[in-house]
Image (tube, rainbow, N blue to C red):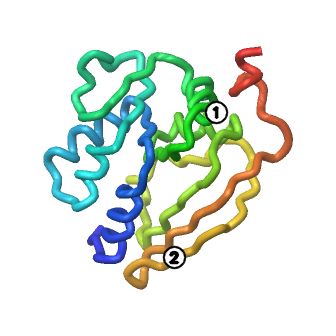
Amino acid sequence: MQRRPELREDRVRTFAQDHVLVLGATTYREFASFVTTDDEPYFDSMTAAPKIVFSSTIDPAAPGWARTRVLDEDAVTAVERLKRTTDVPMRSHGSISLNRALLAAGLVDRVEVMVFPVVAGRAGGSALFHGGVELDLDLVETTILDGRTVKLVYEPHLHGEIPEGVGPRLRA
């Protein structure tokens, strides 16, 4: 995919905002690797942002990427606690299983979807919503970038109750 200036500027603005980056271990490892080897203007903001990684396999004493805190605990429980104790927004990028769990627990305030004019075919393997909970999505923002990429921002609302085995019910 060829990067376009408006898309790049949008990513720069997004990652320059005050936030905590919340990641699963696999996405964390991938990001920690490519932000040091690739050159995008928003990678410095990602590195400067505080990061929370949910992992039982990454060494909390030496995570390998600046401003990273590794938590070996249930992400739903931790994010629920963090949302009660801080006003700093949390942003997750990638981390499909983490995002599925947070969506199912009703802990996601906004879902940002970027629609790229590309057919992935066999290259696309993990769909965020496949097999997940049912949601209503209220559209709160639409942006067209470079005349071809569409950024959609939604507020998600669970259909019915939080599913058994997810979030607060897990602790009960």
Residue drawn at x 53%, y 61% is 113
Q: Nearer the viewer, residue 29 or 66?
A: 66
Callout 2 amino acid: Thr
- 60 displayed left or right of 54: left
- 132 displayed left or right of 98: right
Callout 1 amino acid: Arg
In the image, residue 67 sits, relative to residue 171, either above or below, namely: below
Q: Quadrant of the N terminus?
A: bottom left
Q: Give the alpha-carbon distance from disc 1 to disc 2, as whole Å.
A: 31 Å
Residue furthest bottom in the image: 147
Helix, strand, or loop for circle 1? helix
Give the mark nearest the N terminus, 1 or 2. 1
- 76 displayed left or right of 148: right
Q: Nearer the viewer, residue 170 or 66?
A: 66
Numbered label attached to residue 84: 1
Residue furthest left in the image: 37
Numbered label attached to residue 143: 2
For label 1, the crowd category at 10 Å Cα-Cα, with few meaning under 14, some 14 to 19 and many 20 or more, is few
Estimate the x, y position of residue 129 in percent, counting from the top left: 62, 48
Quadrant hosting residue 141: bottom right
Estimate the x, y position of residue 91 in percent, counting from the top left: 48, 47
In the image, residue 82 sits, relative to residue 110, either above or below, namely: above
Q: Quadrant of the C terminus?
A: top right
Residue drawn at x 38%, y 53% is 123
Determine contact: label 1, label 2, CB under 8 Å: no
Residue furthest right in the image: 160
Q: Nearer the viewer, residue 111 or 17?
A: 17
Estimate the x, y position of residue 74 in percent, counting from the top left: 56, 21
